[in-house]
Every structure is written in structure tokens, then in C-alpha cells.
Image (cartoon, helix red, strand yellow):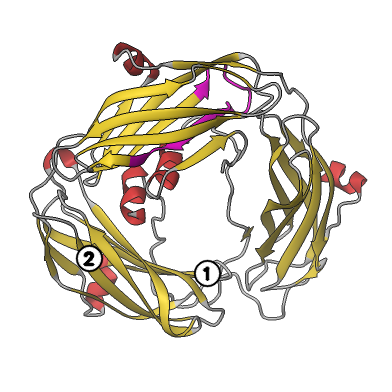
Amino acid sequence: MSTTRAMPSGRRRATLAAVAVGAAATATFVGTSALPATAAGCVELTPPQITSFSFAPGSVDVRSGEKKVKVTAHVTDTEGAELVMATFESPTGPGGKSSFAAAHLKLSSGTAKDGTFTGEAIVARGVIPGAWKVRSVSATDVQGGSGFLSYEQLGQKGWKRDLAVKSTPDLKKPAITALTVAPTKVNTKAKAARVKVTAKATDNMSGVAFVAVELTRKTKGATGTPATLVVLKRTSGTANNGSYVGYADIPRWVGTDSWLVSADTMDAAMNQTEYSNAAVAKKKWSRSVSVVSNNDTTMPALVSATPSPTTISAATAVSVTARATDAQSGVASVLVTWEGDGGSLTVPLTRTGGTPQNGTWTGKGNVFRCLNGSGTWTATAMLTDVAGNVHKYTAEETAAMGIGTLTVKEEPGASSTYPDSQSDVVPDTSYDYEDYVAIEQ
């Protein structure tokens, strides 16, 4: 199964991280990446409260293999906690390298409004040893409110925050030793084409975590360049010396051009090796696929978009139903935003009926529990098709199409300021590539 969206410049590393650490997957990127539904312009009045936190054991030895650390937190929230996470970080090792492990906690007893959440953080073999710290504990509720505790704040509460790790650090990068793409010529005028990718990869210690191969159209697009990313599955051997296979789908309507091959591999200790197209050519591996395809230069069209309800106040859930068309390559993504004095609501939609050429798209967004004023919010929209054509609709255009506005009513006594929060520090939720891989292991 493939998904279609854009591969904007600079997004490749994060995208690889997002799809690489699970089982084998294939994703075709032409358009904008999916975003969570968000409402901006106000601040969550009562963030989730983390009332206890612990983990066990307090020390692990991963010299012979990975170890699991059980993490427990108790969270209360008037709306209901949805995402609870704890992240561990190593001291800085040779070359400025750090290692990470994270636990996504799930409700194990009680309710989302007052419950215990548990999960496991996996400390991989080959990580940086020493005195690890709990980098952060965070909880997010269904309205987007976030409670956050730093290492310092955990200490102030007298809660456990240090993890001792014994490890022989893995500082050597993994290597791809063979790479083949076949066939090297495809025609997608009538239907999408599938390309088989095979590779061999080695790692002397912690083991290969993933091998990913990307095919990118040589000619860059104005807003996004079609690209296909495939994360290979190990079919034989071991994580230290294995063979990997995957399948990359090249869609229709992407024009006649060469698609260039690049590759990436990372081991369990987060050492990474990237192979540019030039590096692939130097290795005398398959470096490109010749694609014959029709051109799609027509922007996708938004036919309708209906919010429900149309009158909202704090903590309102808004459902959106839209119809979008694109006669050739098909619609890849639909994003609708309502904005006015006091805030905005952005809802990414998912196709739930029809076809990419003529389909029904639905989604839901939540307005936070506070609003900075009443008024009318008008709609804008952005659609992207598989070929990378983008259609942006202004508020004037959506009004002319009959797309409804949102009437916003501020609740009496609503405020846009936090009460005493668990944290007076804005949490850093921007994980880099290595962080994300560690979290998703």
C-alpha cells in the first residue's frame, strides 16, 4: 500500500524516520504531509497534570543485548489525557554523540481523566553508557493541552529521574554492501509501476535498524518533487549481516524523466550512513529508473467543504466533509483552515469515499477550551495532487464557492493565560532524526 504526498526540500530525513522503524513500508511523496488538526490563537486553560512518575529498573546492562525499562505515570485531566511519553537521554559521548530511548505510555488502569499510564523504553545495545537522565515527561489531552516536566522539575518533586546504563558504545556506522533496483525502465501511462529493490547491509555490533531507498524524479517541481521512499524488510540473515527486499511504486502522471536512486541505513545505536545518487553510482549499483509517463499540469479542485457545527465555542469538535477532484493524477491531500479574530482551526482531511480523481474527504478538529474573542472565521484551503500540483484557495474564493464560515462565541470568563502550570518552560518537542528513531523503536 502506498500513500501520496509531497516531498518538500529538507523533509527527507524526518520522513525516513517516521516510516523506517516499523515493518517494511512504501510511501510515495507528492504534496503536503499530513498534520494533526489544530486550533491556534488561544492557550489551554488547564493542562494535564502528571501526579506521579516512576520507572524500573534503575540500571541496565546492554553489553550483550537491549534491555527494557518499565515506565509508569499517573495523569489527571478534565478533558482526558491522550498521549503520555517519557524520554531518556544519555550523557554526551565521543564525537558529541548522544543516545536516546523513549516510552509511549498507554492507559493501563483508571480513566483518561484520572488514570495510570504504563509503557516500556528500550535501551539498545551499543548506546552511549553512563548516567542517563529523564529528558522529559509529557502528557497531551484531546484538546491539545500539554503538561510537561523537565529533569529539573522531576528532581524538585523528589521523583526518580536517573538511569544507570552499562554499555560498550557502538561508534561504527552500518554499511550497505549491495543494492539493486529492477526493472530500470518503466511506463506508467496506463497504470502505476512497481520496482523491486534488494540490498545487503552489515553492522558489526548493534545491528542494522533499517535500510531505506528513495527514488526521486530528476527534474524538480515548483512546489514539490515526486519521490518514492521504500523501507526494506530483512528477508534473510541477521541484523549484523542481512539481505533486504522492498517494493517502490512509481505513480502515473509524473512526466517522462529519470528517477534517481539514493539510500540510507541506520543501526540500533543510531549510527547512520547515507548514500547520495553520486555515491550509488560510484559503487556501480543501480542508480536510476527511466520513467515514461504522461504529464499532469492541472491543479486539483475543491468542489465543496462543509463544517459541522457552524456555530462553535470553546472545546467544540468540528467535523468537516469535503469533495475534491483531479481528473489525472488524483488528489493527494486536502487541508482546510478557518481563521478570524482570536484564532484559527486547521483540519487535515482523509479520503473516506470515492476515488483520488473524485472523492469524499473527511476530518475532525477540536477548538481549545478558550477563545480570544467572538466573531466569524472564514475558510481557506490547500489541495495537492499526486503530480505535485498545488491549489490554494483564498477566503474570497471559498466564500464564492459557498463554503461555510464558522461563527465563534467566546464563553464568559474565558482567559488566554495559563494558571499555575507544571512547567514554566515551553517543552522542546522538536525531535531530530535520531531522536525520532529512538522513540519509535
- Over which residues does the magenta segment extend? 216-234
User: How far across and down, in percent of the image, does residue 434 sit?
Assistant: 31, 45
- Residue at x 34% of width, y 78% of height: 73
Q: From what the image shows, is residue 356 above or below residue 69?
A: above
Magenta span contains residue 225 = yes
Quadrant position of the N terminus in the picture: top right
Q: CA distance from mark 2 to mark 1?
A: 29 Å
Q: Residue at x 42, y 29 (%)?
A: 197
188 up-or-down from 65: above or below: above
Residue 338 as seen in the image, left or right of residue 82: right
Q: Position of residue 74 (x, y in %)?
A: 37, 81
Q: Position of 224 compared to 230: left or right?
A: right
Q: Is residue 314 left or right of residue 126?
A: right
For badge 1, the amino acid type reads Gly
Q: Nearer the viewer, mark 2 or mark 1?
A: 2
Total marks drawn? Answer: 2
Callout 2: helix, strand or loop?
A: strand
In the image, residue 338 sits, relative to residue 153, either above or below, namely above
**In this orientation, does residue 394 appear?**
no
Question: Label 2, on which residue?
Answer: 68
Looking at the picture, tell me which residue is in the foreground, 174 or 152: 174
Residue found at x 21% / y 46% = 269
The image quadrant that residue 60 belongs to is bottom left
First in residue order: circle 2 vs circle 1 = 2
**Based on the displayed image, in which of its 4 quarters is residue 330 positioned?**
top right
> In which quadrant is the C terminus drawn?
bottom left
Left or right of 43? Residue 90 is left
Q: Which residue is mark 1?
A: 145
